[in-house]
Image (cartoon, grey):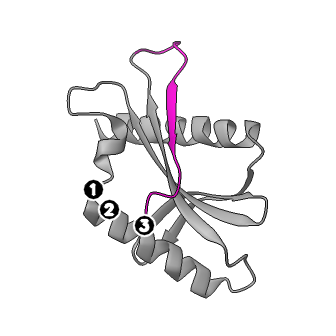
């Protein structure tokens, strides 16, 4: 079961990277570890850094993918972003945190991707 969830997560992150690239974002990194958690995707849109959390689901039994981004998870995303910026002072100082919610009920179907921008405001 763990391997299935990891595989689904990797697939979702690849779909998210394709989605962002198709919309003009530049992918700077993936699966970046910090003491506060992992940054799924680090992207850049114009002069703004975008820290992206990807949530992928194949069922809505337990809610939509974005509902997994709890207030506690948001705190970890903020701490991870601030830590990464502190460790990489050469990066642009304008930044935000986005969530990409990916739902795909069956293999072979195109995923539904919902992009939530600037979730920490």
Q: Is residue 89 above or below residue 29?
A: below
Q: Report the residue at 74% width, 49% height from top.
A: 25
**Is residue 41 on the magenta stretch?**
no
Q: Name the residue under label 3.
A: 77
User: Which label belongs to residue 73?
Assistant: 2
| Residue 110 in which image quadrant | top right
Q: Mark 1 points at which residue?
A: 70
Q: Report the residue at 21% width, 26% height from top.
A: 61
In whole angstroms, how far apart are the C-alphas of marks 3 and 2? 6 Å
Magenta: main secondary structure equals: loop
Q: Earlier in the sequence, mark 1 or mark 3?
A: 1
Q: Where is residue 102 in the image (x, y as percent from the top left)?
A: 46, 33
Q: Report the residue at 52% width, 73% height from top.
A: 81
Cβ–Cβ below 8 Å for labels 3 and 2? yes
Q: Is residue 84 above or below residue 117?
A: below
Quadrant for the N terminus, please: top left
Q: In this view, does 98 lie above or below 6?
A: below
Tell me the SS state at disc 3.
Answer: helix
Cβ–Cβ below 8 Å for labels 2 and 1? yes
In whole angstroms, how far apart are the C-alphas of marks 2 and 1? 5 Å
In whole angstroms, how far apart are the C-alphas of marks 1 and 3? 10 Å
* Magenta-tinted stretch: 106-121
Tell me the SS state at disc 1.
Answer: loop
Q: Where is residue 37 in the image (x, y as percent from the top left)?
A: 41, 68
**Is residue 110 on the magenta stretch?**
yes
């Amino acid at each position: 079961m763990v391997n299935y969830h990891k595989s689904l997560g990797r697939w979702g992150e690849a779909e998210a990277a394709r989605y962002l690239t198709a919309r003009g974002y530049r992918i700077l990194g993936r699966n970046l570890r910090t003491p506060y958690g992992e940054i799924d995707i680090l992207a850049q849109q114009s002069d703004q850094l975008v820290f992206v959390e990807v949530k992928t689901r194949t069922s809505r039994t337990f809610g939509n993918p974005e509902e997994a981004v709890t207030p506690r998870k948001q705190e970890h995303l903020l701490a991870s972003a601030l830590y990464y910026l502190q460790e990489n002072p050469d990066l642009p100082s304008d930044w935000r945190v986005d969530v990409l919610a990916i739902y795909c009920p069956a293999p072979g179907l195109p995923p539904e991707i919902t992009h939530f921008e600037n979730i920490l405001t």
